[in-house]
Each structure stands twice: as C-alpha cells, then as structure tokens.
Image (spheres, rainbow, N blue to C red):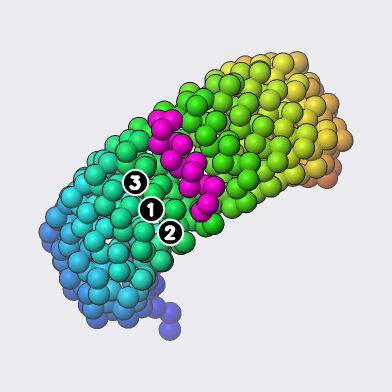
Amino acid sequence: MQTLTILNLIYNQIGHAGAQHLADGLRTNMTLTTLDLARNHIKHVGARHLADALRTNTTLSTLNLCHNEIGAVGAQHLANALRNNKTLNTLNIESNQIGDVGAQHLADTLRNNKTLITLNLWSNQIGDVGAQHLADALRNNTTLTSVDLGSNQIRDVGAQHLADALQNNTALTTLNLRSNHIGHVGAQDLANVLRNNKTLSTLNLYHNEIGAVGAQHLANALRNNKILTTLDVGDNKIGYAGVQHLADALRNNTSLTRLDLASNQIRDIGAQHLADALQNNTTLSTLNLDHDEITDVGVQHLANALRNNKTPITLSLAWNKIGAVGAQYLADELRDNKTLTTLHLSGNRIGDVGAQHLADALQNNTVITIVFLIYFIYPFALFLADTYHIRSRVQ
C-alpha cells in the first residue's frame, strides 16, 4: 500500500487554525516528507503550531511557508524548533517580513544546526544588520549549502559581512543576493572571497549596483578562480567597459559555465569583447545577453566567434536590436555549426527575410536540436514546413 509523502496545499486559505490541525497530524505522521503551505495566511500563530510539531516529527524534510505573514515572531518559533529537529533540510520562508530580528533568531540556530541544507529568505526586509547575524552563523555552519537572500535591503556593509564569513565557510555552494543594493565596494569584497573560497559555485548579483568597477573586481578574481560555475551580474549598469574586464577574464577562466549579462547596455562593443574571448574559452556553455542593445554588428562578431568555439553553448539574444541582416549572420553560422545548442531571439525584428534565412539554415543543421524563440511576422506553417526535421518552436 502506497503512503502519502508529498502534500501541496498552496493557496487554500488555511489560516492558523488549519495549520494547527496539520501540525497535530505531523506529530504522529511517519511518512510525509514534503509539506507546501505557501500563501495560506497562517501568520505567527500557525508557524508556532507547526514549529511545535517539528520538535518531535522525524520524517519531514521540506517545508514551504512562503508568503504567510509569519513575521519575526514566527521565525523565532521555527528557529527554536530547528534546535532539536534532525530531519528538516529545506526551509522556505520567502516573503514573510521577518526582518533583521527574525534573521537573528534563525542565525542563532544555524550556528549549531547540522541538518538544514537549503534556506530561502527571499524578500524578507533583511538589511545589513540581519546579514551580519546570518554571516556570523555561516562562519561555523558546516551543512548549509544554499542561501537565498534575494530582494532584501542588503548594501555594501551587509555584503562585506557575508564575504568575511565565506572566507572560512567550507559548505556554502550557492549564494543569491539578487535585487539588493550592493555597489562596487560590496562586489570587491565578494570578489576577494572568490580568490580563496573553495566551495562557492553559484553567485547571483542580478539587479544590484556594481557598475563597471564592480565588474572589474569580479573579473580580476575570475582569472584564477577554479570553483565558480555560475555568475549572474545582469542589470548592474556594467556597460561595455565592465564587460571588457569580464571578457578578458574569460580568456583564461576554466570553470565558469554560465554567465548572465542581461540588461547591461553592453552594445556592439561589449558583444565584440565577448566574441573575442569566446575564441579561446573552452568552458562557457550558457551566455545571456538579453536586453543589451546589441545590433546586427554585434551579432556578426558573436557569429564569427562561434565558428571557432568548440564548446556546446546556449546563447540568448532576446530583446535586442537584431534585424534581418543579423539573422543572416546567425543563419550562415548555423549551416555548419555543431556547437550552438539553443538560440533565443525573442523580441527582435528579424522579419520575414530574417526568418527565411534561419529556416534555410536549419535544413542543413542536423547535428543538434535547436529551439528558436522568435517574435516575427512569418507564416508559422511555412516555417515548420521549411524546417520539418528540426524541432522548432515559434512564439
């Protein structure tokens, strides 16, 4: 007889009373491993009921309480439960207004907790003070591998605290600081971490304020870093000057596989810098250049680079200024290309002529499956007819 292991009750108006009933069930249940109560208005009272159950429950490993208004008090209840619980390894309390005080409660528990692996604190009004509390906990924590602090209020000071902690931390592999207020000073502190840290493989700084100077600091660290595989610095006002620094680092870097530079106004000059780097780079497999004001000229540079690059790569050029000429450059490359696996061209202006160039090229490209995401006015049936042997998708 099969038993229930996953229960998803998202968006069910459960409230704290319903949370109490579920908590009562958790005290004796021996099979449930995942409970999703997102967006149920359980508030701190409901969090307390669940926390009480977690003190004795020995099977639940994943708990999602995002968007539940639990606040700092609710965070305290959960933190207290984690002192004794030996099975919960994933906790999501995104968007719960726990603030710096709630972060402190969790940090106090994390100093000694040996079970929690993933902690999501996205959008919780955590500032530099809360970041400091969490950083202090990370100095000694040996199990937490992923922390999401995106969409909070962390500035350079908070980034510095986290960076200092990561100099000694040997467990964390993923740090998400997306949509905070980190500038080039904070970027420098994080870059210093990359010089010595041996575990951090994913760093997300999307939508911060690092600028070209911050990009330079990160680039300097990437020249010798052998651990980081994913770097997201999209929407950071990096510009083509900052991209040049990163491109120079890519010439020698042998670990980075994914680089997100979307919404940085790198333009054709920045695309050229990256293209030059791709001539030598042998590891980058995903490059996101969406919303970067790249025209047909920049696309020509990138297409030329792909002729020599031997690494299978996903290239995203959505929402740029690419026309039929740029589509032709890409089409010429696709005729014999054996490395471009995915190409995103949504939101450009390639038109009927550009679409025909791509369709013609796909008839000869039989080595790989290419997914095209293209916005243009072009007969859908004709496109499929021209490329019937390629799995294509048009949006």
Q: Is residue 223 left or right of residue 173?
A: right
Q: What residue is at 46 percent from the left and 36 percent from the top? A: 188
Give the left or right position of residue 290, taking residue 298 as reference: left
Q: Residue at x 32, y 75 (%)?
A: 86
Give me the residue at 30% from left, 55% from top: 136
Q: Is residue 391 left or right of residue 73?
A: right
Helix, strand or loop at mark 2: loop
Q: Contact, CB < 8 Å: mark 1 with mark 3?
A: yes
Quick one: SS at disc 3? helix
Query: Neighbour class for label 3 at 10 Å: few (<14), some, many (≥20)?
Result: many
Which amino acid, by three-letter code, is at mark 1?
Ala
Given residues 93 and 220, the one toward you in this image is 220
Tag of residue 152: none
Residue 108 in picture, x, y percent from top left: 24, 61
For residue 372, above or below residue 145: above
Q: Say which amino acid is labelled 2.
A: Asn
* Residue 43 part of the magenta segment: no
Q: Which residue is mark 2?
A: 169
**Along the viewing direction, whichever of 239 and 371 lies nearer the viewer:** 239
Choose between 261 and 93: the one closer to the eye.
Answer: 261
Q: Which residues are magenta?
A: 183-197
In three-dimensional space, the C-alpha distance between marks 2 and 3, rounded to whole angstroms, equals 12 Å
How many marks are shown on the rendered structure? 3
User: At which x and y percent is residue 344?
Assistant: 64, 32
- Mark number displayed over residue 161: 3
Q: Which mark is residue 165?
A: 1
Q: Earlier in the sequence, mark 2 or mark 3?
A: 3
Is residue 187 on the magenta stretch?
yes
Q: Quadrant of the C terminus?
A: top right
Kind of element beneath mark 1: helix
